[in-house]
Image (cartoon, rainbow, N blue to C red):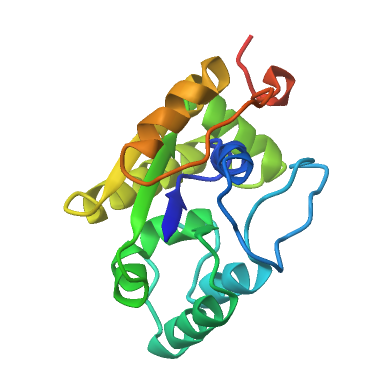
Amino acid sequence: MIVVLGFFRSGTSALCRMLDYCGVDFGKGLIPPSKYNTLGYYENHLINELNQAMGHGFHVERPVPRPDVLSTVKSLLDIRNPQAIKDPRICRLVPSYVEIIEDPVFILIERDEDACVKSFDNFTLNYYGMAHARALRAQYQEMAWTDTQDKKRVCVTYEDLLKDWRQVAQKINEITPLNIGEWGGIDRKMNHAVLR
């Protein structure tokens, strides 16, 4: 199973859209599009809620995995059997997800720090502030990077996805097969937080 990792507003949904186009099934029960992500989040709403139940808000403390919740996540994955999952909160729960997913393939995506932090700050309506957003982003990235070091993974950037999605797909295809065909790519207008 593919597990997409990246901080909020780092391009995880755009990456998932490309993966979906390349034949990767994210399953049913996905969070619907919204004004903040008009093309969809590619996140299962139940897994999202369960991850939040383990203490995931936008705070900086590391959450404490709950065996009862993880058991429910595992059951949900066994029943729905998606080929991929995505929820930025998984960045801080990699060791727990490794226990419940057989042979995971991690795809880590990063985005320019200033653009990512600005987009997150806009998304949260400036509630937390830029300094908190930077600290939170750094924590998510560090935990995802550290906890997947000895795992099957590939690292990509949002900027590369915008520039040449086929090259990103080929890089991912080297560790897990994709059905790469013809596609228009990522709409550059979706890059809402480009610093001007």
Residue toward you, 81 or 67: 81
Q: Check the image and name the residue furthest to the left.
A: 150
Residue sitting at 49 percent across and 43 percent down? 132
Residue sitting at 53 percent across and 15 percent down? 163
> In this picture, is 56 found above or below 72?
above
Left/right of residue 65 with respect to residue 189 in the rendered view = left
Left/right of residue 148 with respect to residue 46 in the rendered view = left
> In this picture, is 152 found above or below 37?
below
Q: Position of residue 193 (x, y in %)?
A: 65, 24
Q: Check the image and name the residue furthest to the bottom.
A: 68
State the image quarter where residue 109 is shown: top left
Q: Position of residue 76 (x, y in %)?
A: 55, 80
Residue toward you, 165 or 157: 165
Q: Position of residue 100 (x, y in %)?
A: 36, 76
Residue toward you, 77 or 159: 77
Q: Check the image and name the residue furthest to the top.
A: 196
Residue sitting at 57 percent across and 20 percent down? 162
State which quarter of the image contains the C terminus. top right
Q: Is residue 180 visible?
A: yes
Q: Check the image and name the residue furthest to the right.
A: 35
State which quarter of the image contains the N terminus. bottom left
Left/right of residue 56 with respect to residue 147 in the rendered view = right
Residue sitting at 37 percent across and 71 percent down? 101
Q: Position of residue 124 (x, y in %)?
A: 68, 46
State the image quarter where residue 103 is shown: bottom left
> In this picture, is 41 found above or below 187?
below
Residue toward you, 25 or 195: 25
Q: Is residue 60 visible?
A: no
Q: How many marks?
A: 0
